[in-house]
Amino acid sequence: MTLFGELDGGVTIEKLRGKDTTVKMSSGNWYWTSWGIKGVEDLGGGNAAIFTLQQAFKLDNGEGVGGGAFNNQAFLGLQGGWGRLTFGHQAGLSSGDGDYSMLGGSALGTGFTAIGNLAGVFLTTGWLDNSIAYRTQKYNGLQFTAMYSNGIDGDDKEWSKNSHYYGLGLTYDVGAFNSNFMFELEDHKGTKLADGSPAKLDKTQYYTAGASYDFGAFTLYGAYQFVNHGTRMPNYNMIHLVDASSTATKPATEIPTKGVRQNAASVSVATPVAGGTLMLQLNGVKGKILNDSDKYQAWSIGSGYTYPLSKRTLLYGSVNYGQGGKALKHSNLDGFTTVFGMATTF
């Protein structure tokens, strides 16, 4: 068994449009602040039983994140020459978290702040209860991943009343070139309205791709995502789940939402500077709330610098600026942020 973890603490200065400047201690800026236990038992024949239990928390006050113990990852499984199969609480393929995330094509990823990173333009999937994941070994640079959740937030009802997740992903890495493509679907079958009736949401479809190439002096990244019938805007800026209007023949609670449709892209570069790594990133998104045709858009410029003090400890800093338009104007993606701090792993 291995005890592992990462600690990340810093200071975030934020000025959102139309709001006062805030200065606060923050954790989990570049790394997750978490601790965990993982184990491997040799079963012979190249096979092994594996498990991981991992819990995230806030470094400033020790409070757990997300509720419950081992809220990051909690899974049990098997691995061998045929691949890796695990069951439990795991993160979706485009989440940017956990062992199975394939989110790539970005120098900043989901690090530092949403203004400037992929979370500020992409719709990333989250942590999944009751999930099963399978990943092959790499063959000539190709690796395949599949994931399914029988109940994202619970598995105590019949199948048709649970919300399910489906994910398929492919990576191709050869030499200095790395790439990924994934398709994900959420059916929202278990989603309820405030009055307890079914929400009747359309299925959310995610198509996400990313690539990078290391030229030696610098690495160039690019990423793209198309989402249809999403239930929110980037960085969890919410939309109404149903049309607020009603008709004589159909009450508002029975009108199915169409959600949002959006296109998002990012281009970035990372290069060695003064013993550390400098990262610059440009992000953009355009979308529409399909029920009422309201539009939204956002763009941001993100930057980051990491400097290693040792193999496990680094200093970091980030400056980011973004603008939100239409339905995202004056949102948490519309303004300026800067972050600096320190992170270590064990």
Image: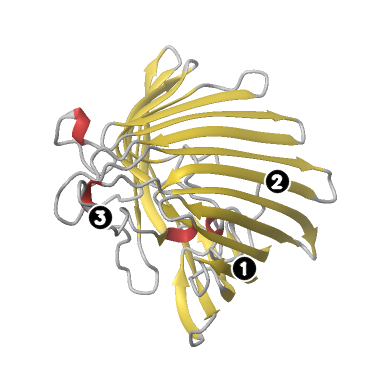
Q: Residue furthest top?
A: 45
Crowding near the residue tagged with mark 2, few <14, some 14–19, many ≥20 C-alpha atoms within 10 Å: many
Relative to 30, is 2 above or below? above
Element on which disc 3 rests: loop
What residue is at 47 percent from the left and 46 percent from the top? 95
Q: Three-letter amino acid code at disc 3? A: Ser
Q: Identify residue for label 2.
A: 222
Q: Is residue 90 left or right of residue 266?
A: left
Relative to 197, is 9 above or below? below
First of labels 1, 3 by sequence position: 3
Q: Are marks 3 and 2 in contact (CB under 8 Å)?
A: no
Crowding near the residue tagged with mark 1, few <14, some 14–19, many ≥20 C-alpha atoms within 10 Å: some
Q: Residue 197 shows which numbered tag?
A: none
Q: Residue 315 shows which numbered tag?
A: 1
Residue 104 visible from this viewpoint: no
Q: Residue 246 shows which numbered tag?
A: 3
Q: Three-letter amino acid code at disc 2? A: Gly
Element on which disc 1 rests: strand
Percent of width and height locating residue 179: 67, 35
Q: Is residue 124 left or right of residue 276?
A: left
